[in-house]
Amino acid sequence: MKASWDIFCSVVDNFGDIGVTWRLARQLVAEHQCVVRLWVDDLRAFERICPQIDARQARQFQDGVEVRHWPAEWPAEAAADVVIAAFACQLPHGYMEAMADRERAPLWLNLDYLSAEDWVGGCHGLPSVKFRGVQKYFFFPGFKAGTGGLLREAGLLEQRRNFQADRQAQVDFLQGLRVAPAAGARLMSLFAYENAGLGSWLQALASDVQPTHLLVPEGRILGDVQRWLGVESLAVGSLQVRQSLTVQVLPFVRQEDYDRLLWCCDFNAVRGEDSFVRAQWAGRPMLWHIYRQDEDTHLDKLEAFLALYTQALSPAAKAAVLALWRAWNTEAQMAEAWKNLLQHWPEVSAHAEQWCLEQGLQADLAAALVQFYLNWI
Ligand code: TRH
């Protein structure tokens, strides 16, 4: 009999929580024939990354996943064989009772945030708390052996490579978004939180000899873009030109299309967790705006990833990447760091593909979860 899975997603803010859990739920169904219910407390956020979702429906099916609204008043529901609490969200008490009431206790996992820090490998798979005899385990995604790996759908890298080799497919896709970069323009995407350092970067792009076409999905960075442009409003579809720089505001697109957008671009600025991973699978140079945490603990996380990501680069290219990423994440001036990165473009580009290939050798997160379950039963 197929195993049943319940995934609980509480949308704290933004789109990462739902972005990760929706991706995982789909993959468990499509590639591992699991029966999956995805419980989401905010269907409006879900609707943004998956427009087919009807936020008024308490229960609906999408891509074979049973999507359930997670209501404040918990209904009586039987617990599944495997229960995933994403990002340490607190399960409804009634559901925990249902887990403990099962004849055979379910496998209960906390799917944690992604980090490249060393301690992750030591904690992955360890037991956590118990509830009425039901044991909870830590499950950590990660970049190294001994972690749960990264979300990566079967055939993703091949699909990406075929798309990148097909000029017409890219032109058609971009045309669908009304994007038509000038010949020779560097195509870039910008998905980030508010950042006071943005103006200096845009200035450097504007005064560069090579033109840049910058695609900005609507979101939190738009205020900074608007300020630098000196315009009163910046709506979806806006196209503004300043010297060598063209800025175009894009609508927020469905997850699959966001992947294609990343695949089309020569450089991607991404943020949070899921877009950060998708940019790595795009095999193109990138810049990460990490999610800010109290007491700057996110900076340790940033350094841990940088240490790993830049390991194979030459000292000069490594210094260029480090300087750019650190400047961006401390909202410092970006111009010098950007110009310096351009000096190392061929190496940084080749490295992005190499990094992607190496990470692609690891078991993906969905497969690792299924394996964890199989080892456990
Ligand atoms: O939106 P994020 O900043 O999300 C998160 C949350 O803030 C979360 O609480 C925090 O813990 C985590 O970051 C670290 O960034 P992220 O993770 O990249 O999620 C964005 C999702 O939105 C991702 O699945 C890609 C998707 N997306 C689209 O589907 N279409 C788009 O046009 C864009 C720009 C993104």
Image (cartoon, grey):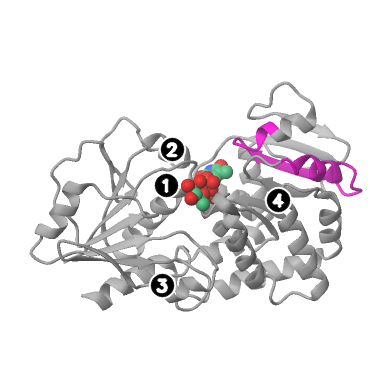
* Badge 1 density bin: few <14, some 14–19, many ≥20, Cα 10 Å: many
Q: Residues in magenta?
A: 196-223
Looking at the image, tell me whether mark 3 or mark 2 is earlier in sequence order: 2
Q: Residue 10: give x, y in percent of width and height.
A: 36, 45
Residue 278 drawn above or below residue 363: above
Q: Amino acid at mark 4?
A: Thr
Q: Is residue 121 left or right of residue 33?
A: right
Q: Which residue has dot 2 on it?
A: 45
Residue at position x 41%, y 60% in the image: 112
Pointer 1 residue Cβ closer than 8 Å to ligand 1: yes
Compared to 27, does 199 lie above or below? above
Residue 193 position in % (x across, y down): 62, 42
Measure the alpha-carbon separation of dots 3 and 4: 29 Å
Camera-side mark, 1 or 3: 3
Cα separation between marks 2 and 4: 28 Å
Residue designated by label 1: 18
Residue type at mark 3? Cys
- Please provide percent x and percent y for residue 129: 27, 64
Residue that label 3 marks? 123
